[in-house]
Each structure stands twice: as structure tokens, then as C-alpha cells.
Image: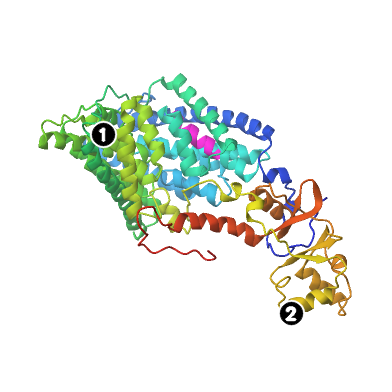
Amino acid sequence: MSSRNNNHGSGAIPNEPLAASGVSPLALDAPAPFRIVLMSFLAAGVGLLAGIVAYILYKLIGLFTNLFFFHEATTTFRSVGGHHLGWWVILVPVVGGLIVGVMAKYGSSKIKGHGIPEAMEAVLVNRSRIEPKVALLKPISAAIAIGTGGPFGAEGPIIQTGGALGSLVGQVLHTTAVERKVLLACGAAAGMSATFNTPIAGVILAIELLLFEFKSRSFIPLVIASTLATAVHMQLLGPGPMFQVGAVDFAIPRALPFYLVLGPICGLAAIVLSKALYWVEDLFEKLPVDELWWPAIGALGLGIIGFLVPRVFGVGYDTIGAILNGELAWKVLLVVMIAKFAALVISLGSGTSGGLLAPTFMWSAAMGGLFAMIGNHVFPNAHLSPGAFALVAMGAVFGAASRATFSFIIFAFEITRDYNSVLPLMLVAVIADGIAMLFMPRSSIMTEKLARRGLRVHQDYEADVLTQVTVAETMEKDPPVIAAGTKVGEVAERIARHDPAVARYEALLILDNDKLSGIVTRGDILRALDGDPSGMITVEEAGSTTLVVTYPDELVSEAAAKMLHQDVGRLPVVDRSDERKAVGYLGRAAILAARTRRLRDEHVREPGWWGTTTSRTTKVHGS
């Protein structure tokens, strides 16, 4: 049977029919193979470009660091701790803050912050469209902020910049919004991979924070982009990770009790980080000065802290490496933990530009190393490795704060390449995540900013129940039918007296000698009565004889796609071997019933083998 936009459901869906937008039925199912191939080639280009941009940003940070702290025009990356500026060093971050403030006010406000929430906002609100100027201004502003002492990492800005590059490619070419989202995520994953040489974590981070799906159409391009970006990193910066970690003793299973205690501590630390950061942001918003000055004010606080503790200046990869290798004394770890935390929340809360990962890694790693040292002091025979606990805490805190726990389990593993790290990482990270979810159930450090703008980010994802249920399982097996010669006046009279055979349905299947010949809706009947108040028109004349149908073995998702494509509200279910044989009826209520089944599976408790259930059963409407 041919299909057209008939009236067995017209007007029920307020949006423009997908058919009117030129969407083919194939597009509602799965992307054509050639589109996946095309996206893979585009992802390869985005990955290479993001890898190069990450290298350029790395060199820009080195250049600005040397210009401002050592008055040398070189891109060699080195620690700020060896500067000879004396107390003048307090003013260096202020200069950077002023420049970033001007860029944010007169360039683009999207450069403010650590970048990942802005990329998420582009996906949620702007159909994955990012302005071209963001791709230029974000890395430059980040390089200036970090190069003048900002306690940030390059990863957040390069994730946003890589996402912007992917989005621009999707805007230049003919792509769908979903394809543009995939390219944006490819750029973000490539940026993460090119920064830390962690390709698997880059892919998973993009899935957890940007895509919220696991499909071939996105996974294949993501892997390609991440792999090529990592290859660029290896070619330009060397094969190793950004900070080297020596052999570490994770003491499994001997140290498991200590890891069990570390888990809740990391979860609480993640909560404190998020609350403190947004509390500082709120304080800055109350200042009676133009927001142009906020980064400079925050930078002044950073300068004072950095004057006292020079290790807080800059990215601090060298300090992170020292912590992970157990090279710092407990007093240094304590100072670094407190000072870096304070410098981070003051600087980033002021609205400047910089990444959140590296500074969080530093102070949380210091916390983990300090925990191990305290454990060794209290229990002399514990022999805990500060480097092991530093690494585990580093992954667990940021994983819990961002709700990207899986990403940072893999991230920490990729840094060490030591399989023995997996068990403590998994245990501590999920405990920390559970604690964070308990106290911050609806937001994370990534989504709190969006939640304040009225955007709710659903970060849990699962297989759609409509793709797991066939039409036969949810359709009405006794379809509402009416003979082709029946007059519309008779049908109207039966509806008026609430005849259950017709009154509870929005449409009836028309049978001619027991063969399906059409469908008639209540709207059809009303229009027929308006044209002929006598009601002598037959239902076959009033209804539609060119039908959109579904089959018992089709998935409900496929049937729903037909409804959306043709702008209809219900479908006759017919036998594949004889499309004039009606075997059922599928309406919106039947589709909702499939979802109701999922709700029932999640919330209705069934009696177990051990005695009888004493808890109250959660009822679902309609169950």
C-alpha cells in the first residue's frame, strides 16, 4: 500500500510533519552506510586538526609563560617556580586577567570558564553550533590566562576548541544536527586525547558528557578522531603521557580497607569543589563592578597565593608527576592541596579562561598522597604507596565531580598503563560517585552552570524500550472495525450513546468483505457531518483509503517513526503476506504502554522466594 499524509491522525501532532521537511523514512531508522563513511573521513580531519591545535596551544602557553615570567621569547615548556620576579609576580596574573576580561566582554563570553559546560550547552541548546570566533578566542585566552600564572590545564580549552572545530566542519557542510553533534564530540575527544595521550578516555569522555549515546554512527568517528589526534601528540610531543609515573605498588588486596575509606573522602572532596566553585562565582556576580574586571580581581588573589606557594602557578604537570611518583613530603602535599584548591576556585570562579582537570588532578592527588602518609603513620605496617593513592584519588575526585566516572577510571589507567591500578580505581571511583550522587543528585560540576540557566542534562542513558518491543507485543489484537457501507450518521449516533465498540477509539478500521480498505477518524466523521448534516455519507467515502500500515514483527520504534514521518496518530497492523488482512491496531496509547512496562519493571516490587514482601509496592498509573 502506498503511504501519504492522510487524515487518520492529522492535527494531533502540532509540529511540522517530518515528511514536509524532506526527511526520508530511511533517515528515521539508521544512517545510510555512506554517511558513516563520510563522517569517519570528516572525523579523521577533525582529529588531525585538533591534534595540531593542541600542540599549538601547548606551545602558546610555553611562549606566554616565558614572556611574562622569564622575559624570554621561547616556547620551551617550564615551571614558573624558577622565576626571579620577587613580589612583582603578584601582578603578572592580574595582567592576564585584564586581557581575558576584555576578550570575554568584547569578543565572546563563551571563552569564560573551563570549556566543557559550554560545549554541552552548544549540544543541548544550539543544535551543536559553535561560533567560529570561539575556536580562535578560546585557545588564545586560555594560553594568556595560563601563561600569566593561571592555575589551569590546557585540556578544557582544547576540548572546547576541538569541539568548535568539529562544529564548524558540520556547519560548512550539509549535515544533520546529530551529525554535527558527532563532529563536535569528535573534536572534543581529539582535544582530550591530544593533550594527555589518553585516546580511550577521550572517547569515553565524549560519550559520557556530550553524546549520551553509544551507537556505531558516533563511536566509529570518535575512535578515528581520537586515534589520529593521539598520533599527532606522539609525533609532536613524544609517545609518553603528559606526566610520567614510575612503578607503583597498589597493594591489592592488602590495602583494600584503606581504599574503602578513601572512596567517601574523594566523594566529599568532589562535592566541596563544586559547591566552592559556584559559591565563588556567586560572590563575583554580587560585586558592584563591571564583569570585565572580575578576572583581574580573581587573578590578584591568585597572585598573592602564588607568591607564597609558587607551585600553584601554571599547569603544574611537573608537580603532578612529582606527587604521583611519591617525591614530595607530607608538609608540601598539604600546602599544595590547600593552595591549589584555593587558587583554582578563586581564579575560575572569577570567570577567566582555563581548564579544570589539571588543577583538580594536582590538589586531589596531593590529598590522596597525604591520606596514604597518614595511614602509614597510624598503621606502621600498612606500607601504603603515596603515589598509588594519589593516582586513585586523582581519578576518583574528578570522575565524581563531573559524573564521568568511567572516563576517569580509564584515564588514570592510561596514565600508568599498569593493570594493577584498575581494581582500586574502580572501587574508589564508584564509591566517590555514589557519595556525590547522594548529595548532588541533579547536577555536577559540569552541569550546575547549565542547571542555573534552566537546562536539565540527562546524563543517564539506556537502550530505548521502543527498540526492544515488537508491534505484536503491544498492539490491540482485537482492532476496532466497521463495515465500509456504514453511514457516518450511524457512527456518530453510536459514539453519542457511548457504544464501547466505537466510542473509546479515535479511529476505526474500515473493512470491505473482511478486507482492510481504509481508516476513518473522528475528525473525518465531523467533517463529513459538516458537509452533509444528514449523515448519509459512508465511512469509506469520509475516511482515507490510502494507508500507512505497520506489521506485527516490526519494532515499536519503527512504527512510531512512521507515525512521525506521516503525521498520523494510529496505524493499522496488517499481515505481511496479505496487507489487506488487519490483525491489530496500534495507537499512541499502545506505544505508551511499552514505556509503562519499563516503568513497572523499574518500580513495582514482586514477591521473592524468601517469605512475603513487607514493603509497599510502588504503583504506576495504568498498572
Q: Residue at x 49, y 40 (%)?
A: 207
Instruction: Place residue 95 in its image quadrant.
Output: top left
Residue 572 in view (yes/no): no
The type of residue carrying mark 1 is: Ala
Q: Is residue 185 magenta?
A: yes
Residue 143 lies, in percent from the top left, at 41, 35
Q: CA distance from mark 2 to mark 1?
A: 74 Å
Q: How many marks?
A: 2
Under circle 2, the secondary element is helix
Of the pair 4 and 606, the residue shown nearer to us: 606
Residue 153 lies, in percent from the top left, at 37, 36
Residue 191 in view (yes/no): yes
Q: Residue at x 35, y 38 (%)?
A: 152
Label 2 belongs to which residue? 496
Compared with 411, 103 (above or below) is below
The type of residue carrying mark 2 is: Ala
Residue 74 lies, in percent from the top left, at 38, 24
Q: Residue at x 47, y 52 (%)?
A: 457
Q: Is residue 424 magenta?
A: no
Q: Which residues lie in the magenta part?
A: 184-194
Under circle 1, the secondary element is helix
Identify the disc placed on residue 390.
1
Q: Is residue 117 left or right of residue 412?
A: right
